Amino acid sequence: MTRRRKILWFGLVLVLVLAGAAAWILHVPKPQIASAEGQLAPDFILNDQNGRPFHLADLRGNRVLLIFYRGYW
């Protein structure tokens, strides 16, 4: 490959990477309630993977990341 062709390929790859990064950044959901960040979540009960009840209050004092999925992939 000539030097010019290598530069063109590098530029093309760079543009594709930057476009992918921009698309990912634009699709990251923002918090629905901006003031909720850093606030304590209300206690709730859900069943775990084994069907046993799970209380959020059991994790008080620990850092917890809550992620809710819509139910389809």
Image: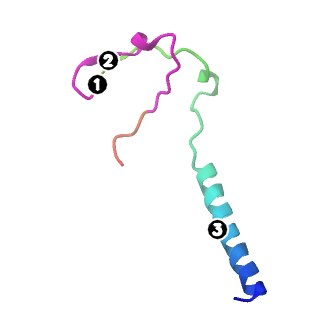
Q: Of all residues shown, which one is farthest toward the bottom? A: 2
Q: Quadrant of residue 16?
A: bottom right
State the residue in front, 48 or 10.
10
Our reading of the magenta stretch's main secondary structure is: loop
Q: Amino acid at mark 2?
A: Phe
Cα distance between the residues tagged 2 and 3: 44 Å
Of labels 2 and 1, earlier in sequence is: 1
Which circle marks residue 72 in the picture? Answer: none
Residue at numbered disc 3: 16
Assign a secondary structure to mark 1: loop
Which circle marks residue 48 in the picture? Answer: 1
Label 2 crowd (10 A; few <14 / some 14-19 / many >=20): some
Contact (CB < 8 A) between labels 1 and 3? no
Measured as percent of width and height from the top left, residue 50 is found at 22, 26
Q: Of all residues shown, which one is farthest toward the left? A: 51
Label 1 crowd (10 A; few <14 / some 14-19 / many >=20): few
Assign a secondary structure to mark 2: strand
Measured as percent of width and height from the top left, residue 13 is found at 66, 71
Image point (69%, 88%), residue name? 1
